[in-house]
């Protein structure tokens, strides 16, 4: 009986270890998927600046190098400081602002004490990319709002952009890597600790994400 109990215990531990290794491998693949998706979109923006012979092209390349440095050296960690993630978002938003017209506006607001908080890296960037990719129009008024708020051991992120014609932003149903990637990583890292709401209302597209912090 002791041998049987030992064997069952050993088998259970092995199965748990296999599951942990499988989950770790899946997370590693998901992180690798973020980089190409992000890079393709950003290079397209820099190409647009170059075609316009914009003086901002060199600054855009510098911003891109900062973004890539973060993705290579910081996002390889299981967790990053929330303040670093916010700075990464600021760099991306500054890069996108270089191609805005007078009809476009972008607001990025951070509220609450973000120090001493660590999170899974690169969770918000796909939603921000989505807002810029589908929420801007050269001839029509386009407003984008992005925000992060921390209070009472909870983190709220939101992004909101206008919808122009049939140019619908990505959702988990019609997207490729971006949004599905985030949903899977949230399920693995914050099971039962997050709420994600993606919706369309009054000609706008909005993402609301709430994460309960440890």
Image (tube, rainbow, N blue to C red):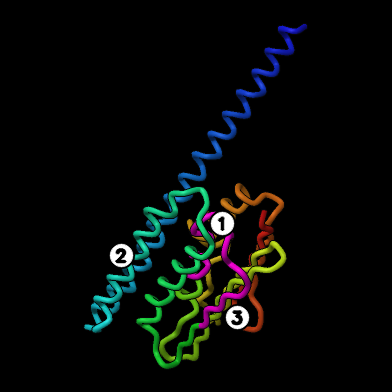
The answer to which image quadrant residue 20 occupies is: top right
Residue shown at the point (69%, 68%) measured from the top left:
151
According to the picture, the residue beneath numbered tag 2 turns out to be 65
Q: Residue furthest bottom?
A: 102
* Magenta residue check for 43: no
Element at badge 2? Answer: helix
Residue shown at the point (60%, 49%) measured from the top left:
189
According to the picture, the residue beneath numbered tag 3 turns out to be 204
Comes first in the chain, label 3 or label 2: 2
Q: Where is residue 39 in the image (x, y as percent from the top left)?
A: 36, 62
Between the C-alphas of marks 1 and 3, the distance is 31 Å
Instruction: Kindly identify which numbered label has been placed on residue 93.
Output: none
Name the one closer to the observer, 159 or 81.
81
Q: Please report the bounds of the magenta region as a residue range.
A: 107-128
Q: Where is residue 112 in the image (x, y as percent from the top left)?
A: 63, 72
Classify 122 as above or below 156. Answer: above
Comes first in the chain, label 2 or label 1: 2
Between the C-alphas of marks 3 and 2, the distance is 32 Å
Element at badge 1? Answer: strand
* Any part of residue 103 in sight: yes
Other-residue count near label 3 (Cα within 10 Å), few / some / many at <14 / 14–19 / ≥20? some
Residue shown at the point (57%, 74%) measured from the top left:
159
Element at badge 3? Answer: strand
Residue shown at the point (56%, 78%) measured from the top left:
109
* Any part of residue 207 in sight: no
According to the picture, the residue beneath numbered tag 1 turns out to be 118
Look at the numbered discs 2 and 1 and tell me whether their residues touch, using CB distance below 8 Å.
Answer: no
Name the one closer to the observer, 148 or 169.
148
The answer to which image quadrant residue 213 occupies is: bottom right
């Amino acid at each position: 009986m002791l041998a049987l109990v030992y064997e069952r215990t050993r088998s259970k531990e092995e199965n748990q270890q296999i599951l942990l290794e499988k989950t770790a491998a899946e997370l590693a693949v998901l992180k690798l998927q973020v980089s190409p998706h992000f890079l393709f979109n950003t290079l397209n923006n820099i190409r647009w600046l170059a075609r316009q012979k914009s003086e901002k092209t060199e600054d855009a390349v510098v911003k891109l190098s900062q973004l890539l440095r973060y993705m290579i050296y910081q996002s390889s960690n299981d967790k990053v400081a929330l303040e670093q993630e916010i700075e990464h978002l600021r760099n991306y938003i500054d890069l996108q602002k270089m191609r805005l017209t007078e009809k476009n506006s972008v607001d990025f607001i951070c509220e609450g004490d973000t120090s001493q908080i660590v999170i899974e890296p690169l969770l918000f960037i796909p939603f921000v990319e989505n807002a810029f990719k589908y929420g801007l129009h050269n001839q029509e008024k386009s407003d984008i709002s992005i925000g992060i708020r921390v209070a009472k051991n909870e983190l709220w992120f939101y992004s909101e952009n206008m919808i122009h014609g049939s140019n619908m932003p990505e959702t988990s149903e019609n997207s490729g890597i971006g949004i599905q990637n985030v949903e899977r990583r949230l399920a693995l890292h914050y099971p039962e600790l997050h709420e994600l709401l993606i919706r369309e209302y009054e000609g706008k597209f909005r993402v609301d994400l709430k994460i309960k912090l440890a």
